Image (cartoon, rainbow, N blue to C red):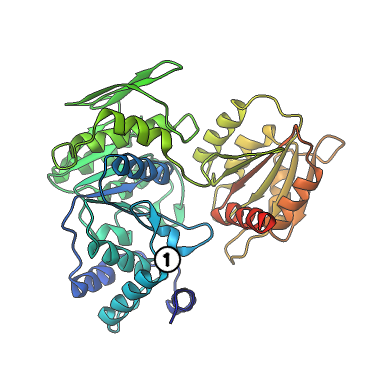
Amino acid sequence: MNLSEWLALLEKRHSKEIDMGLARVAQVKQSLGLKFSCPVIMVGGTNGKGSTCAMLESVLLQAGYRVGLYIKPHFLDFNERARLNGVPANDALLVSAFEKVEAARGDISLTYFEFTTLAICLLMSQETLDVVILEVGLGGRLDAVNVIDADVSIVTSVDIDHTDYLGDTRELIGFEKAGIFRAGKVAICSDPQPPQTLIDHANAIGADLRLFGRDFNYNGDKQQWNYGGREQRRNSLAYPGLRGANQLLNACAVLAALEALRFQLPVGAQEVRTGLVMVELPGRFQVMPGRPVVVLDVAHNPHAAGALAQNLDNMGFHAYTYAVFGSMQDKDIDGVLAHMKGRIDHWCVCDLPLPRAASAEELAVRLEAAGVTNDAEHSVQKFISPEDAYMFAVSKAGENDRIVVFGSFLTVAGVMRARRTKTH
């Protein structure tokens, strides 16, 4: 089977899309003899995981290390999830890893996410790498990635999301996120107000907990910023290439992790500076070149929508702002709209190609309930896909307007696909 045939098979094989628990994954991991011979950094959290992983990868590549990165979900090609030295793994490597997992699992049923996580971890364990960075999927404690023991674990932020699986308070969710911490190993949290449950769990298992504001911090002016950790200071740093007010918290977590690994993976000041400036990550307040301005952002919960709103406010004047918005039904849609409604003039809401997505009709009803009106200056239009919604926004927006594409990964991926088709 080729890669797309494998992925089609895995998508329909297991009865549940999400099946919490590590017993089945741990069993197959043992059958595979899966282990890493280099340091492993694991990154969890509600928001900021992808940015933190991308910055770690960028800095470590600048320092000349061979880096493996597992990051998700993907936008256009599955291969984006497995990066070797900054480049997506090829189909042949992935298919070979899939075949090995298939042979090792016997009659154990694995979800798409569990199967592909094991395959990508196996692939990376068989490459000659100096460091592996693993992004956690949902939660932490029961996420498939957590069958791997990390040398350094990072929790970026703790906020309300995936309440059906993780609980509906920051304290409950904080406990789930802290599940990636390990006894005697460095555990970093860059959330300025970490839940007490996270701190208590780290202390209970004897992790070496490092908290933002207590063990590491930053200060700076408009030109540059400085990092101060327990044993290391880094001064005169350039601001990260990723835009947004919260990126300094993510960059601090990166530097705290590098500080913890400074004897195994020493990194110089210039490599840190260059790595932070050069970092790229699709779909995180990504401002596309050209006019009208197009912003792509996978903000799909209130915490992320608050950050997106703040970033939009910092962009300067635009006559009208169009939004292309699609969301999963299980998200706090009203919480997201509360942050965004005052910043959007024309809403283009869309259906998404998943059963658990909210319909465009439902999103329009939520907008109306939130007080968004249809008049000469404002509108709400419904579309059957992100592509259609985006094409409509492009046809209406003037060159001094902007189009903000946000919500589910599928919304942003649909628009990326539409833009790619248009340019080819």
Which quadrant holds the C terminus? bottom right
Taking 380 as reference, is 313 above or below it?
above
The residue lying toward the viewer, choosing from 24 and 90, is: 90
Q: Residue at x 38, y 39 (%)?
A: 157
Q: Which residue is label 1 attached to?
A: 18
Going by the numbered disc 1, the residue's amino acid type is: Ile
Quarter holding residue 97: bottom left
Q: Residue at x 37, y 68 (%)?
A: 116
Which quadrant holds the N terminus? bottom left
Q: Is residue 193 visible?
A: no
Quarter holding residue 362: bottom right
What x and y, as percent, mark residue 178?
A: 28, 46
How many residues crowd around disc 1 within 10 Å: few (fewer than 14), some, or many (20 or more)? some
Quarter holding residue 256: top left
Looking at this rendering, what residue extends furthest in the right direction?
Answer: 376
In the figure, is residue 378 to the left or right of 203? right
In the figure, is residue 340 to the left or right of 278? right
Q: Residue at x 56, y 31 (%)?
A: 311
The residue lying toward the viewer, choosing from 254 and 198, is: 254
